[in-house]
Image (cartoon, helix red, strand yellow):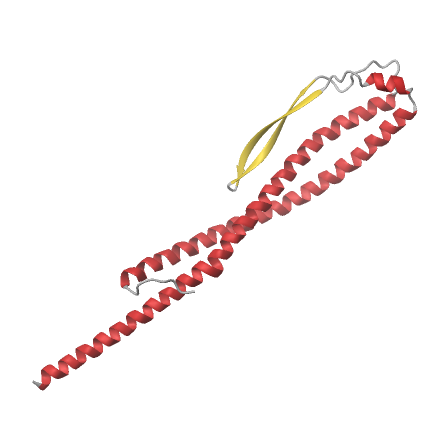
Amino acid sequence: MKLSVNPTRMELLRLRRRTLLAKRGHKLLKDKEDELMRRLLGLVKIIKELRDKVEEEFEQTIKRFLFAMSSMEPEFLEQAFLLPSKEISIDLETKRLLNVEVPIFKETVTGKIHCYGFAWTSAELDIALVSLDRVLKELISLAEKEKTLELIALEIEKTRRRVNALEYILIPSLEETVKYIQMKLSELERENLSRLMRIKEIVRAH
C-alpha cells in the first residue's frame, strides 16, 4: 500500500534511506530468528532426553518407596519422616541469550537426605531417598531448561511478527511509494521539458 507523502526529491531520498534501513533491519531480525530457532531445536532435544530420564528415575524411585513401605511397619515409616533434615532453596538469576533474559536456577542445599536412624528402616528406603535426591537435581535442571525454551519460543514468535511486518507490509509500501514518486518526478520533468520546448518555439517565432 502506497504511503501518503508529497512526491518531492527530498521525500524520495528520505524514503530510499528508510527502505535501506528497513531491509537491513529485516536481515538482522531474520538472522536472529534463524539462530533462535536453531537454539530452540537443540534445547528441545536436550529437554526430551532429560525428561525421559527424570520420568524413568521417578518411576524407579516410586517403586522403591512402595517396596520399602511393604517391608516396614507403618509407624516406623511415619517416624522416619517426622523431622526432615534436608532443605533446598532456589535462587533465580538471569543471563541474556540473543537479547532474551533466560533463567538460571542456583540451588542451595543444607542437611542430609537421610533424616532417621537405620535401626528400624529398610535398605530399600535408603536407596529410594538417594534416588529421589538425584531426581530432584535433574528436575531443577529440567525446569530451568523448559522455562528457557518457553521464553525462546515467545521471542521467536515476536521476532517473526516483526520480520513479517517488514517483509510483507513496510518494505513493499516503501518500494511502491518510491516508484510512485519516481514516476511523478519523471512526469514533472517531461512536463517541464515540454514547457521549455514551447517557450523556445515562441521565442524563435518572435
Seen in the image, is 160 located left or right of residue 15? right
Q: Dividing the image into 4 quarters, which one contains the N terminus?
A: bottom left
Picture quadrant where residue 56 is located: top right
Give the residue displayed 52% in from the left and 50% down from the top: 159
Does residue 179 lie above or below 19 as drawn? Answer: below
Image quarter (top left, top right, bottom left or bottom right) of the C terminus: bottom left
Which quadrant holds residue 24? bottom left
Q: Say which residue appears at 50% left-offset and 54% top-offset.
A: 163
Quarter residue 19 falls in:
bottom left
The percent coordinates of residue 164 (x first, y second) are: 51, 57
Give how far across and how far down residue 94 sits, in percent.
55, 33
- Where residue 72 sits in the image (x, y, percent)? 91, 21
Is 161 left or right of 6, judged from the image as shown? right
Please name the residue shown 35% across and 59% down the image. 15
Q: Position of residue 96 (x, y in %)?
A: 52, 37
Q: Is residue 7 above or below residue 122?
A: below
Q: Is residue 133 above or below residue 152?
A: above
Residue beneath the point at 88% across and 13% down: 119
